[in-house]
Amino acid sequence: MGPIGLQHYLVLGAILFVLGVIGIVSRKNAVGILISIELMLNAANINLIAFSRYSNKPIFPTTMPEAAYMDGQVFAIFVIILAACEAAVALAIILNLFNMFGTIEVDDADTMRG
Amino acid sequence: MGHYQPLLPDLILAMGATFILLLGPLRDSQNLRDFLRWISLGLVAATAATLVWVNHGMATPYPLVGEGWLTTAPLHTAFAVVFLATIAWTILASTVPDEDAGEWYSMLLFLGTGMIILARAANLAAVFLGLEVLSISLYILIAFRYSKRSSLRGGIMYLLLAGFASGFLLFGMALIYAVFGTLQIAEIRTLALATDMGPMAKVGFGLLLVGVGFKLAAVPFHMWTPEVYESSPGTVTGLIASSSKGAMLAAFIPFLFLLETHWSIIWLFAALSMVGGNLLGLREIRVKRILAYSSIAHIGYVLTGYLAGDTLSANAAFLPSITGVNAVFFYVVAYAASILGAFAALGYIQGERDLTLRDLRGVGRRNPVLAFCLLIFVWSLAGLPPAVGFFGKIYLFSAAINAGYFWLPLIGLLGSAIGIYYYLRIIVHLFMMPADASDPKVHASTLQEWVMLGSAVAVIALGLFPETIFSFLRAF
Amino acid sequence: MFYNNGLPALWLIPALPALGALIIFIFASRMPARAAGIIACSAISLSFLWVLNVGTTLVLGNHHHFVEHHWNWIAAGPFQGSASFYFDLVTFAFTFVVAGVGLLIHLYSYSYMKGDAGERRYFGYFNLFAAAMLVLVTAENAFFMFLGWEGVGACSFFLIGHWYQKSENTVAATKAFLVTRLGDIFLLIGLFLTATLVGVSFSQQSAWTQVATSSFIPGFGGLTGPQLILITGICFLLGAAGKSAQVPLQVWLPDAMAGPTPVSALIHAATMVTAGVYLIARFHILFALSPNLMLAVAIVGVLTAFYGATSAFVQTDIKRILAYSTISQIGYMFLGLGVGAWSLAVFHFFTHAFYKALLFMAAGTVIHSLHNEQNIYNMGGLRTKLKGTYLAFLAGAASLAGIPFITAGFYSKDAILWNTLSTKWGSPVIYGIAMLTALMTAIYSFRLIFVVFHGTPRKDIHVHLPDRLLTWPLYILAFFAIVAGFLNLPIVFGVTPIWEHSFARVFGEWQAEPLIHSHAVEWMALLGSGVLALGGAGIAWLLYSPAKAPMPEPAGDIATVENNTPAPYKAVWANFLFHGWKMDGFYNKTFVRGFRITSGVIAWIDRVFVDGIFEAIQAIVRGFHALVIFFQNGRVSRYAMVMLFGAVAIITILLIGSQR
């Protein structure tokens, strides 16, 4: 066991991603699926930040070298904000669904269909 | 400021959308809806004008602006203007209850913002930003009639599945970033073409393609289309089918270098979509679903054109010599002109529950103008001359044949022959079936009828003068 | 605007009926129903007058052709199509029929469709059809022609389904549209090849000769010029077969009789279904360059002629008899094309348009007078009640049968038969089948005459007499059905065949020259086909003559016709008792049963193979549909699962395959 490095973050990201995928495929609860989506997005975020932090120099000399190191981290902030927006809209819709049907199971075949 | 000046169009539209959202609650004003409609229209026009203005004289290949955020390449700008036009069309054609007008128009403008960002994105982060802005506005628009159960269900289904796809897309982007150390698409392109791609890059691009495939509703990522198309308001369905997919198509152009290594995936997408879409539609009786399935097939046709790439092939001895991307541009315009009108027209016709073919009976007599327009739109979707859809297909398939693909255009031709069957069924039910006891209910205002008639004329006119679309493209 | 450099403008020809259609459709709800007919008739008559104007200018001025360019429709690389018009003798023949016969049918419709609920819609589409058909035949290039080609298909679709309240009619309309579309796909492929190889303009077609001699053409994957010509020609042939109801795409035409009778007369007899003939005549250089292609056209033609005649022989619905007869006669036109007798194929189109439109309209008058009775065995004895119609029908049937020397059908059909025997592309075998078909044609033509018009009425039906607009167009057509033949008298009569002579200007060296120059042989062939026609009429008299046999009991409606069909054959037996059983047995076994077996076999082939193929395609399509719809069940998690599989599949393909 060496010091915590890039590999560890990558493995963590991959695990989170797979957990998210499994959650979406297996869950029927709308909020559960939403949480799984957040997991997937955050798995990507971890990767983005880790790469941004650990790649000391860009492989390719970009046109704006000073910004290149920060790219991944800035992207992660974008993702966090957008995920928050998405969650807000999702929760609003789910709330309405609950008010109307008294359930947030999205897989009720006969109600979801048609 | 000079450096950020090219971001002005996006800024105007986003600020305007926020402004209209704030105006929305002034519900005591009687004519608020009309006022908001025209002001939104003005904002879209201003954005388009600014877009053309800031890009004027910047037509070097892929010049990057705003810290490498967006591109000002002519094709992408042209795409953005087309998408703004579809937004403007929807603002005119949609029916909104008075009390929700502010939210409705504001969301349409946000949708437009997402589209023009996505269409001109030069950076992975911009692709994601544009895509999400577009998608979030769409979730709201799909679920807009929140008192209807089907509407809410369509919204949540699209949201969850799109979120799933976004997860794939973003993870793919992260992997690409890891391999190439940059988010700039142009730089990724140079690096990817210069070096041998490792497995990580391949997985990254593969995940990216999952996200793209979902947005385009290419088989096997098409499953959401029938439910979502069915439950959305008619005009919104048109936007989902036309410009929201179109924006993704435009964003994909810089990634066309992937054809070098990943062409088989695109080929499969195209073939499966053309076959699957046309087969799925055959026995459907709910009209919006028929068009939903047909839109899957149409994406297959478009991807066929994309396989031809952005260069003119050397053996272009055959058919119109046209690059794949230009053919795709043509098709996006042609398809948008037809499908927007078709879905809007269906939106004006009320069905018992879901709109079925049976509900179309008698519309030809009840509202001949609307029925005639619908006929023209469906005619164009079926790809029959002289409507513009016919040329769209010709250009796409000839581009693909020029690039050396023979089977795919053949599948496309056979697929569209199958497809004519269900388009014809719509026409048969519109005009050639006796109406049931009750008269069909059709609600369209005079303005809406004029808008429909205008686009029907446009569909035919563009078919008679297809060169116009290329002249438009060359003007940028 | 109406004259360019002293030459009459061509755009007016299709524009006038298009304008009529536009007016009718725009003001439909605000005009009396009868006004639609008046507008439609005026539009088509103006167009006809203009055709005459242009045509006489062409003929008297001794021009080869007129061209009129309007705008560039589509221009991308070799793919050039312009909205331009072209007018030569072939165009004149077709426009004359489309506008002229079209005018008569419009007038007829004005009376026939009186009081119909969809009268305005009917005339709107009728005018639109005329416009599209005129675009088809006046277009300067194949691409613009395709616009008209699709336009007539659409109008045909709407008019077959005119009485859409009956669902069979819409099914028939859809079937017609889909089958012709199948041909259109091939036509489009042919058009693309043409556009690339020589250009779509009709004046560029001589460039095919260069294609024929080149062994390598870049961009076609190593195909040689002759191979490309063969592929293009087969595509055109399939496109033409779809539109003209030729084997193997003939199945739609009999069903298309679901439309009003004038529609059958104009679209499914005189004009639209001959578009395939026009197409091949326009591309005659392409076809003439490949002997295999010519043989294919000839075989398709003769098979269709035979098929149509045998099928017509056992039908009992008067319109279906005429429909099969149309299929058969267009088969003769294709045969004419296939042996290189281009001008004679056009000539047969010309005469056929008159007598077949006449037969349809006369049949329409009969049907109309008997309150929509279509079974011929429920008719009979109409000779005295509908005297004018009878005479007109007789002229038409005589022309169809090819009664020698006095009918147009004789001269046009015999000329094709003679070319089948005598030119380098012809063959004695094909000639033999064509002659046999001619005999059958005569028999079924006169069967119609004897069963429908002779004898005593089978049913006590009240006949209401047709008015003048229902009869005068018949008389005019009857006149042409007799005299049009004199435009091309055989050379053995010692006169110049005017038609062939004039059209030599268009078809030039590609026109097939007879290899047999003996006048005696030609006389024999001529008399032979004359004898066949008269003999056929005689056989029909023996088989169906009511004068020699008591009338059978009235037959039921068409649905039960199969049971009733043998009745007249029994009557023949009774009649010939006097001559002994042997003769009856002979007739019954050789002719009647022989024909019935042959047509039974053909019907079986039709059912098992042709329909079978279509059904198999349908079944396959349905199976796939069931498979794909299985996953479409509205469950988010199922959808997500499919997406996941898709993602895994993509990544697997990427990692395993495409190693650069």
Image (cartoon, coloured by chain):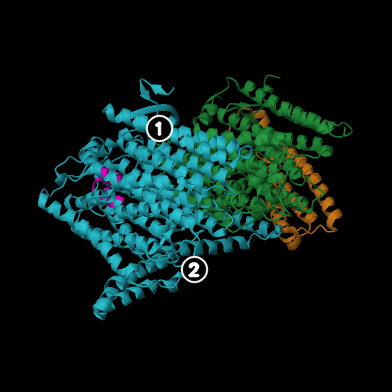
Mark 2 and mark 1: Cα distance apart in space: 45 Å
Q: Which chain letter matches label 2?
A: C
Chain letter, orange: A
Bounds of the magenta span? C333-346
| Residue pointed to by mark 1 | C49
Select label 2 or label 1 by which is in front: 1
* Mark nearer the N terminus (2 vs 1): 1
Residue C217 spot, x, y in % from top left: 30, 40
Quadrant of the rendered structure where residue C446 is? bottom left
Chain letter, cyan: C
| Residue pointed to by mark 2 | C559
Residue C466 spot, x, y in % from top left: 47, 51
* Residue B354 visible to the viewer: yes
User: Which is nearer the eye, C525 or C145?
Assistant: C525
Secondary element at image label 2: helix
User: Which is nearer the eye, B305 or C13?
Assistant: C13
Chain B pictured colour: green
- Disc 2 and disc 1 in contact, CB within 8 angstroms: no
**Left or right position of B113 against C501:** right
User: Which is nearer the eye, C626 or C249?
Assistant: C249
Secondary element at image label 1: helix
Whether the magenta-drawn stretch holds residue C345 is answered as yes
Specify the amino acid type for callout 2: Ala
Q: Residues within 10 Å of mark 2 (few under 14, many from 20)?
A: few
Q: Residue furthest bottom?
A: C581
